[in-house]
Image (spheres, grey):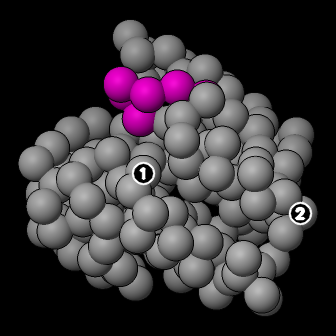
Amino acid sequence: MFGDYVNDMKILFLHGLESGPNSKKAKHLAKNGHNVYAPKLPKESFSESVRIAQEIVDEVKPDCIVGSSRGGAVAMALNAQDSKLVLIAPAWRKYNVPPELRSRAVILHSADDDVIPLSDSFALKASTYVCGEGHRMSDKNALYNLDSVLRI
């Protein structure tokens, strides 16, 4: 499907508040040959979500951390070590996460997101790709762009 696609990456997928480990994005990543670690993040505790994710980062040392919405905020709060970050409409402002990113961070965000403003992603001053539909970012265009940024 994607001729030069980089398969078999270890990816930590951090879902959003109203999603879960079996989201369309997590399934898409696994279907494309990646080793996907997708923990269930508790809605009621942001700090516990960060603790769970950090434990996986420390143990697995993923090649990439993909965080969607609240999961993007969790990803930003981690000591990601050498992992690349792919943030999808990161809700960093909503969860009071400092707007600091490493150089290996990429953001995907839809222009018609009605939950997290696109301006929040631009404020992070990282490579930002405007794509997809709505906040969920699980449409064909968003998933294609997710695949694309994993190759960068």
Between the residue at mark 1 and the residue at mark 2, the CA separation in whole angstroms equals 21 Å
Which quarter of the figure has residue 55?
top right
In-image side of 28 versus 5 (left or right): left
In-image side of 133 versus 80 (left or right): left
Q: Is residue 41 above or below residue 86?
A: above
The percent position of residue 88, horizontal first and vertical second, equals 40, 57
Dot 1 or dot 2, earlier in sequence? 2
Mark 2, other Cα within 10 Å: few <14 / some 14–19 / many ≥20: some
Q: Is residue 104 above or below residue 21?
A: below
Q: Which residue is mark 1?
A: 138
Residue at the spot x=25%, y=49% of the render?
A: 135
- Image quarter where the N terminus lies is bottom right
In terms of secondary structure, what is the magenta stretch mainly?
Answer: loop
Residue at the spot x=16%, y=55% of the render?
A: 113
**Residue 114 in magenta stretch:** no
The three-letter code of the residue at mark 1 reads Ser
Of residues 93 and 36, the one drawn nearer to the viewer in this rendering: 36
Residue 13's disc is: none
Residue at the spot x=41%, y=16% of the render?
A: 43
The percent position of residue 106, horizontal first and vertical second, equals 48, 74
Q: Which residues are magenta?
A: 16-21
* Marks 1, 2: nearer the viewer: 1
User: Is mark 1 in CB contact (under 8 Å) with mark 2?
Assistant: no
Q: Is residue 68 above or below residue 101?
A: above
In-image side of 143 versus 7 (left or right): left
In-image side of 37 versus 91 (left or right): right
The percent position of residue 144, horizontal first and vertical second, equals 52, 72
Q: Which residue is mark 2?
A: 8
Mark 1, other Cα within 10 Å: few <14 / some 14–19 / many ≥20: some
- Image quarter where the C terminus lies is bottom right
Q: Is residue 63 visible?
A: yes
The three-letter code of the residue at mark 2 reads Asp
